[in-house]
Image (cartoon, rainbow, N blue to C red):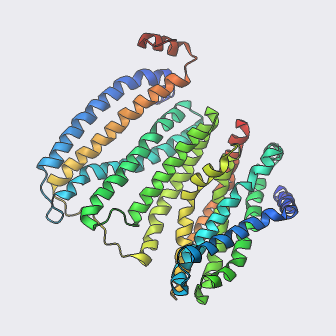
Amino acid sequence: MSAFWSMLQRELVVAYRRRTDLLNPLLFFLMVITLFPMGVTPDMEKLGELSAGILWVAALLATLLSLDMMFRADFDDGTLEQILLSNGVVEWRVLAKMLTHWLVTGLPLTLISPALSLMLALPGRAVPALMLSLGVGTLALSLIGSVGAALTVGLRKGGLLLSLLVMPLFIPVLIFGASAVASAALGLGFKIQLLYICAISLVALALAPWITTVALRISVNQS
Amino acid sequence: MWTWFHKWGSPKWFYQMSWPWSMVLGILALVLLTIGTVWGLVYAPVDYQQGNSYRIIYIHVPTAILAQSCYFMMAVLGTISLVWRMKMADMVLKSIVPFGAVICLLALITGAVWGKPTWGTWWVWDARLTSMLIQLFLYLGVLAIYNVMESQQSADKSAAVLSLVGVINIPIIKYSVNWWNTLHQPATFKLTEKPAMPAEMWIPLLVMVLGTYCFFGSQVLIRTRQEILQRERKTNWVREEVKRLGGVS
């Protein structure tokens, strides 16, 4: 456990020192959102209908974009090898890295999503559903995505392969997330979908640290 | 029994034993597929609702079933490879991937061909179709790993990990889309349910399913044999085998 906390602290400090990296996913999120009114339709009524899906797809893409950074820097300077060789349960440290990823991408995305939902004319009653589903859902994305990030970190051009590997695994989260927001926008309940997202997140929370650690060992041994 | 099982883990034994097995399965596949095709396409009765267009079921359903089982087998082999580190499991897994991808693509294409006359459209974002498409993406992901990773060992292990992770996802996809669909469109497409199907229709279908499984078995064995020769090329028995086959050693 103490390994977890010290690792979390370290990760957060590192993230804070690289503030521009923190902004990138948020800016990407904002820009993708901007593309839809320009590319599809500026009609607020139509946008309102589409907004649930657009917001979720944009959040998913923003998370995907930032995944490659999760282990990259540590792999390049050898820290990752040290982590894997360190005493104690390595999985705790890996989990700390994953949670940090969520804290610096998923959580900010969730927090700014109400502002963007205004731009897309999402009905106000859907905002709680949006924030809840994004909050829990992006955690699942970070956890699932970490497996792909770990598998591809040893490759020079892992980014594209990473999205190919991870995107199919993201689809269930996207389906439930967008569906939760859409049904809330219609004034219906969204509890079922939210519970499903929670279930996916919990399963991912239980399994992802182990699988990611295995994947990291594969990647480190390779080079 | 147990030793028999263990022997399949040895590449040399596998190489020797797979030859008769692949032959038997191949011949069985040829016979079953011929019977099934002729029976299904010529002798099976015309469907009262869909006319003759339903006959693509005899290709579509076997490929769709096989596409699922291929991935499942990959996951099982991935587990074996990660837990017991059997190198044969890696080789078989690698031989299944391209086969599974092609079969999955075939299932999607035949589904589209079937969908056009019955639903009036090539593609619908229906639960089944979407989950099959995702299945194809998963196959392509594993395929990409083999192409990108330089070291054989890490490619094998990564593919095993990915097959395992992917298989967790498959039931999730299947069920999730049920909820997703209730919002978008009612499930009017229940063509794959066949409670009212007469025996003259489903027996040839069963023959086709068995035939495709045999075909799969023989193809995977043949591909694995090639993989064995390639990976074990430094051993003496492979050198002799290659010499015997008339290749350069």
**Residue B160, quarter of the rendered image:** top right
**Residue A120, quarter of the rendered image:** bottom right
Residue A53 in the image, given as x and y percentages of width and height: 54, 74
Q: Is residue B147 visible?
A: yes
Residue A14 in the image, given as x and y percentages of width and height: 86, 59
Q: Is residue B25 above or below residue A139?
A: above
Residue A58 in the image, given as x and y percentages of width and height: 62, 69
Residue at left offset 69%, top offset 67%: A28
Q: Nearer the viewer, residue A201 or B233?
A: B233
Q: Is residue B4 visible?
A: no
Residue at left offset 45%, top offset 73%: B179
Residue B176 in the image, given as x and y percentages of width and height: 48, 67
Residue at left offset 75%, top offset 65%: A24
Q: Residue furthest front?
A: A38
Q: Is residue B88 above or below residue A105?
A: above
Q: Nearer the viewer, residue A45 or B102?
A: A45
Q: Is residue A123 left or right of residue B181?
A: right
Q: Is residue A113 left or right of residue B239?
A: right
The quadrant of the rendering that contains the N terminus of chain B is top left
Q: Count the marks.
A: 0
Q: Nearer the viewer, residue B108 or B237?
A: B108
Q: Nearer the viewer, residue B52 or B159?
A: B52
Residue at left offset 50%, top offset 37%: B94
